[in-house]
Image (spheres, grey):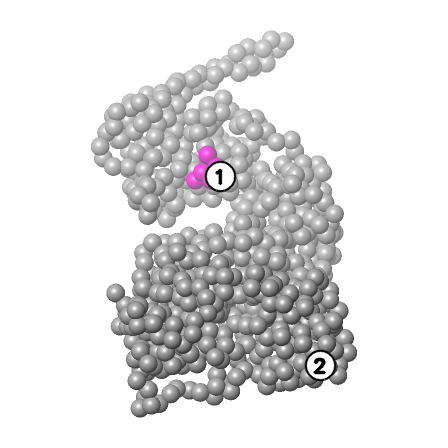
């Protein structure tokens, strides 16, 4: 087995060691302090703690029989790097120097070659000083009595760091023991809290948080004293091969180092490493309204995906790619294996009408197929509903939440039955569409409050009543909206079927009567998100009853007679259910191929094609096995209810349930009588007897015993 020795002292060193462990390459790691040992908590790694001399390094390399040594110590650990290089040369082991890039475009700071020079210069300045270079360089400043009492030091929260502070006379409030990385906001808070006038830092590049320090100093009006990197680490490119017993290579990031190791070890490394992918809600878009957890995720990400309008305001130095489709993101990550810290942005909250769930599912499927190894985490955000409710000073716990932003929703039915409905809209054209639907359904007294670009400087709130709509429409800018629709005159919700027959628009078209409808729909056993076929819809009474039970039920009304199909459409509009009911003017089973697989089917009229209808439905029940070995819902079959009046149809049903694979068969014949007024008397008038047949139609061609 190939073996690698990593001298770690940076985040890159830890990441490289974990990557090697992911690739099943034996990796030993050397760290200098107990605190660094705590951070290196991967049990797959063999970790040595303590500072080593050059001779001890030689013994370790010789006894360990390592193939490659990687020096991933801090850019300023000049003596350690020199010892590692000389030990590897003596043992004739190839060496890779993972040298953190220290380039920076920032200007406006005072630079020094050594800490002694910086300390001497600060003697002539006034104000408090924050030292962010660690405890090892503390002595150069603490021995300067002129600045000692004004000195604050930020060090790692380890025993050794605290002990060095105490040994140099730095105690109490002067010690800020914290573990990074630090955001620009955190740096700024510390600078302001301790009234800092000068901050001392090393030019340690992006990985060392140099940009965040400079940004914070600018905002807080603090001067920056920057210690330049050692000349050896800046200028050296590679030691000539003829002057060394072993080869030495310079790499500036984990990705390049891994590629070099692949060549030296002849092992596959990069394709085996796991990506850390965070799918995060960003709230309304303004970073002030983003959760701290999400903010840090984007700050630390190497690459960030999202819609272009979202990427503009996101924090972090990572590459921003305007992709938001799962396939595009997965393909990009496969083509760019160097990125392991990945974040994807989703507007509002990741759990409220968000693409985060489908993205997570796609990533998990890619993981199971072995094409992209990743660990996915979802972070929440502040939803637009929560933000709008706060702006308006109202609660949303007692409201219905819905969306017509890229989806179909029967808003009219929701508003008819609820006092409050919060709704996501795609644009101002949705307002016009909604208002027209409200008027068609006879809903005339609703109040609409809308929020546009919530949290942004150009945020706008609109409020109007239905009769003011034409005037207000011209004031609405284009864009995505969140709105609250309030209906103080909402109907009391009836949770059972049984609409009075006289409420429907009727002609001579046959209609399933109230009593038969109630029992038939009960036998359908409708569920949330049901997809219903109403075959031979007639007036549409069954379609209406099904759709009104839940806004999540979708109905396809199939009717061959044009007059009846138009009547179904008219009643769907009348009851505000046109968004849930699609009318198909064809003779069943024509057109079934284009429809989604049903979960429930009601057959009120078949025109002699009952066997063909059941056969066409059964063909749509394709059983698939998912990745977890469980069969999909189609395997449970589709719930079918058939109404029959004629003896011929009853005989046909009896034959079919003996031919097709069915379960849970129930055959019930009912005959209802209604009171009919004749003079001063009420006489009972009988309706036609109706057979109600119900069963689960299963996929396949084998009969199963009924339970």
- Mark identifier at residue 122: 2
Question: Which is nearer the eye, 669 or 493?
Answer: 493
Q: Hey, which quadrant is residue 126 in on the image?
A: bottom right
Q: Quadrant of residue 65?
A: bottom left
Residue 454, visible in the rendered structure = yes
Position of residue 422 in the picture relative to residue 40 (left or right): right
Residue 442 x %, y %: 65, 40
The rendered magenta stretch, by its main secondary structure, is classed as loop
Q: Residue furthest top?
A: 681
Q: CA distance from mark 1 to mark 2?
A: 73 Å
Q: In the figure, 517 relative to 204: above or below? A: above
Circle number at residue 669: none
Residue at 38% of width from left, 32% of height from top? 639
| Circle 1 crowding by C-alpha within 10 Å: few under 14, some 14–19, many from 20 | some
Q: In the image, residue 64 lies at what x, y percent?
A: 31, 68
Closest to the observer: 242 or 587? 242
Element at badge 2? helix
Q: Is residue 258 above or below residue 596?
A: below
Q: What's the residue at 61%, 31% (across, down)? A: 493
| Quadrant where the C terminus is found in the figure | top left
- Lower sequence index among marks 1 and 2: 2
Residue in front for this viewpoint, 317 or 702: 317
Magenta-drawn segment: 527-531
Tell me the residue that label 1 is attached to: 553
Count of marks overlaid on the render = 2
* Rendered-image quadrant of the N terminus: bottom left
Q: Please identify, in this view, whether the residue under mark 1 or under mark 2 is nearer the observer.
A: 2
* Residue 323 seen in the current view: no
Report crowding for label 2: few under 14, some 14 to 19, many 20 or more residues within 10 A (C-alpha): some
In the displayed structure, does residue 378 sit left or right of residue 458? left
Residue 519 in picture, x, y percent from top left: 46, 23
């Amino acid at each position: 087995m190939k073996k690698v020795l990593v001298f770690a002292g940076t985040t890159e060193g830890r990441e490289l060691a974990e990557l090697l462990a992911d690739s099943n390459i034996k990796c030993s790691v050397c760290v200098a302090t107990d605190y660094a040992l705590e951070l290196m908590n991967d049990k797959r790694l063999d970790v040595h703690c303590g500072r080593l001399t050059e001779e001890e390094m030689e013994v370790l390399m010789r006894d360990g029989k390592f193939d490659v040594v990687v020096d991933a110590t801090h850019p300023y650990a000049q003596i350690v790097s020199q010892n590692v290089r000389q030990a590897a040369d003596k043992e004739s082991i190839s060496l890779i120097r993972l040298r953190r890039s220290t380039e920076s475009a920032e200007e406006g700071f005072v630079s020094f070659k050594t800490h002694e020079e910086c300390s001497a210069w600060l003697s002539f300045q006034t104000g408090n000083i924050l030292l962010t270079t660690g405890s090892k360089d503390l002595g150069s400043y603490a021995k300067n009595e002129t600045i000692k009492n004004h000195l604050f030091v930020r060090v790692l929260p380890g025993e050794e760091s605290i002990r060095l502070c105490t040994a140099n006379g730095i105690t109490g409030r002067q010690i800020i023991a914290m573990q990074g990385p630090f955001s620009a906001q955190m740096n700024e808070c510390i600078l302001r809290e301790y009234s800092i006038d000068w901050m001392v830092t090393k030019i340690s590049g992006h990985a060392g948080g140099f940009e965040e320090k400079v940004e914070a100093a600018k905002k807080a009006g603090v001067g920056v004293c920057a210690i330049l990197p050692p000349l050896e680490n800046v200028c050296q490119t590679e030691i000539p091969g003829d002057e060394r017993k072993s080869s030495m290579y310079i790499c500036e990031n984990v990705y390049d180092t891994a590629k070099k190791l692949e060549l030296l070890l002849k092992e596959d490394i990069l394709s085996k490493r796991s990506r850390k992918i965070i799918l995060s809600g960003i709230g309304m878009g303004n970073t002030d309204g983003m959760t701290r957890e999400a903010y840090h995720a984007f700050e630390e990400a190497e690459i960030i995906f999202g819609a272009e309008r979202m990427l503009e305001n996101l924090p972090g130095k990572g590459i921003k790619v305007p992709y938001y489709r799962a396939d595009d993101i997965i393909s990009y990550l496969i083509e760019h294996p160097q990125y392991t810290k990945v974040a994807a942005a989703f507007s509002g909250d990741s759990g409220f009408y968000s693409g985060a769930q489908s993205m997570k599912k796609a990533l998990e499927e890619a993981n199971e197929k072995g094409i992209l190894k990743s660990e996915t985490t979802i972070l929440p955000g502040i939803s637009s509903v929560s933000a709008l409710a706060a702006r308006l000073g109202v609660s949303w716990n007692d409201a219905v939440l819905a969306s017509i932003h890229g989806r179909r929703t029967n808003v009219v039915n929701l508003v008819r039955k609820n006092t409050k409905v919060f709704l996501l809209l795609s644009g101002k054209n949705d307002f016009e569409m909604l208002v027209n639907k409200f008027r068609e359904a006879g809903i005339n007294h609703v109040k609409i409050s809308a929020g546009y670009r919530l949290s942004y400087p150009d945020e706008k709130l609109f409020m109007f009543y239905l009769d003011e709509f034409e005037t207000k429409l011209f004031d609405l800018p284009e864009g995505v909206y969140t709105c609250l629709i309030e209906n103080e005159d909402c109907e009391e919700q009836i949770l059972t079927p049984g609409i009075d027959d006289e409420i429907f628009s009727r002609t001579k078209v046959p209609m399933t009567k109230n009593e038969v409808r109630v029992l038939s729909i009960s036998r359908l056993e409708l569920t949330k998100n049901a997809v219903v076929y109403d075959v031979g819809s007639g007036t549409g009474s069954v379609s209406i009853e099904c759709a009104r039970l839940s806004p999540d039920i979708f109905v396809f009304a199939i009717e061959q007679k044009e007059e009846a199909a138009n009547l179904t459409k008219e009643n769907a509009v009348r009851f505000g259910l046109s968004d849930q009911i699609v009318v198909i003017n064809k003779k069943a089973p024509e057109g079934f191929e284009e429809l989604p697989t049903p979960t429930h089917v009601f057959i009120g009229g078949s025109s002699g094609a009952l066997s063909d209808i059941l056969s066409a439905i059964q063909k749509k029940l394709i059983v698939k096995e998912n990745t977890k070995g469980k069969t999909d819902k189609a395997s449970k079959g589709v719930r079918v209810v058939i109404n029959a009046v004629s003896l011929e149809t009853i005989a046909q049903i009896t034959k079919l349930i003996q031919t097709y694979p069915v379960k849970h068969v129930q055959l019930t014949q009912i005959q209802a009588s209604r009171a009919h007024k004749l003079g001063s008397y009420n006489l009972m008038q009988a309706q036609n007897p109706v057979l109600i047949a119900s069963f689960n139609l299963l996929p396949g061609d084998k009969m199963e015993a009924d339970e």
